[in-house]
Amino acid sequence: MKKLFALFTIIGFLSLGAFNSVYAQQPDSNAAEPAKVADAPAPTEDVAKDVAPAEDMSFTQVIKQKFIEGGPGFMGIVLVCFILGLAIVIERIIYLNMASTNTEKLLKNIEGALSSGGIEAAKTVCRDTKGPVASIFYQGLDRSHEGIDMVEKSVVSYGGVQMGLLEKGISWISLFIALAPMLGFLGTVVGMIQAFDAIAAAGDISPTVVASGIKVALLTTVFGLVVAIILQIFFNYLISKVDSIVNDMENASISLIDLLVKNEISKK
């Protein structure tokens, strides 16, 4: 888990550094444009040349351009939140998919093992099966000699431990969901302050200055909301996945206790 976080963090900072370098180099390329405009025969042709590449830009290029226009400061922090949130999402999806168990098949195998080899054979079946359900079954079977009540308490207690493992790290996703739009709003407020500072310095309200400043300010909010929406979708999926596994654990635990009671009655 820590290695995965470190990998995505390094990728995020490298991406942020690349955006910063492009952002720093952008004024130089714009400064070289007036010389080309002076040599052009007509200004209308220059406008057509500038508009045509913008229309041919791909979606990723547009996103990159808007990211640079929003400023690498707040946009970089929002990007780091997105990368860390996705890292946790990927890790949780892999873990929860590996934790899923065919409880019906496991119960049939345990029932057959109880009939043929007793408790030890059933414990062997649980050891050979991956997932939290098999671990809970093993804890219950390991205390079956102490009575059904102790089995039930053991299943409930260890079920709570497994539930905590299933929900591990999900709270961080909810943090990034709340943090991303908040950072976007903060960038918007800072951008609006800078726009009003530019108006105060110019001594006049220029539509160009106001429009460009507001656009840059709102870009941080847009990116923050997009990050929050994407992470919210994955968050709801993970919550539903955890609920499904927990329901299977509870139903399977009741079936295990019934099997143990039936096995004891059959012995008598």
Image: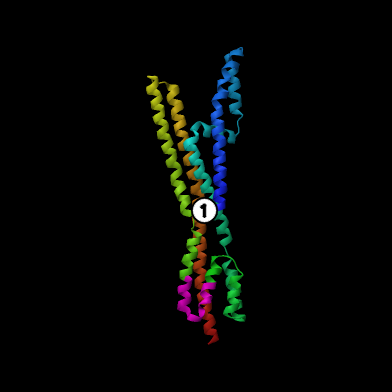
Magenta span includes 152: yes
Vertical side of 59 occupied by 49: above or below: above
Q: Residue at x 39, y 26 (%)?
A: 197
Instruction: Let me know if residue 63 appears in the view.
Output: no
> Would residue 46 be found to the left or right of residue 180 on screen?
right
The disc labelled 1 sits on which kind of residue? Tyr
In this rendered view, identify the residue nearer to me: 88 or 249: 88
What residue occupies the far bottom of the structure in this picture?
268
Density class for disc 1 (Cα within 10 Å; few <14, some 14-19, many ≥20) is some
Q: Secondary structure at mark 1?
A: helix
Instruction: Let me know if residue 152 appears in the view.
Output: yes
Quadrant for the N terminus in the image: bottom right
Question: Which contiguous range is marked in magenta?
Answer: 138-155
Q: Quadrant of residue 181?
A: top left
Q: Residue at x 41, y 29 (%)?
A: 194
Magenta span includes 121: no
In this rendered view, identify the residue nearer to me: 86 or 222: 86
Identify the coloring. rainbow
Which residue, given by chain and number where applicable, does mark 1 sit on? Answer: 237
Q: Residue at x 45, y 22 (%)?
A: 208
Secondary structure mostly taken by the magenta-highlighted segment of the chain: helix
Q: Residue at x 46, y 66 (%)?
A: 160
List x then y, in percent, for residue 10. Answer: 56, 44
List x then y, in percent, for residue 67. Answer: 52, 34
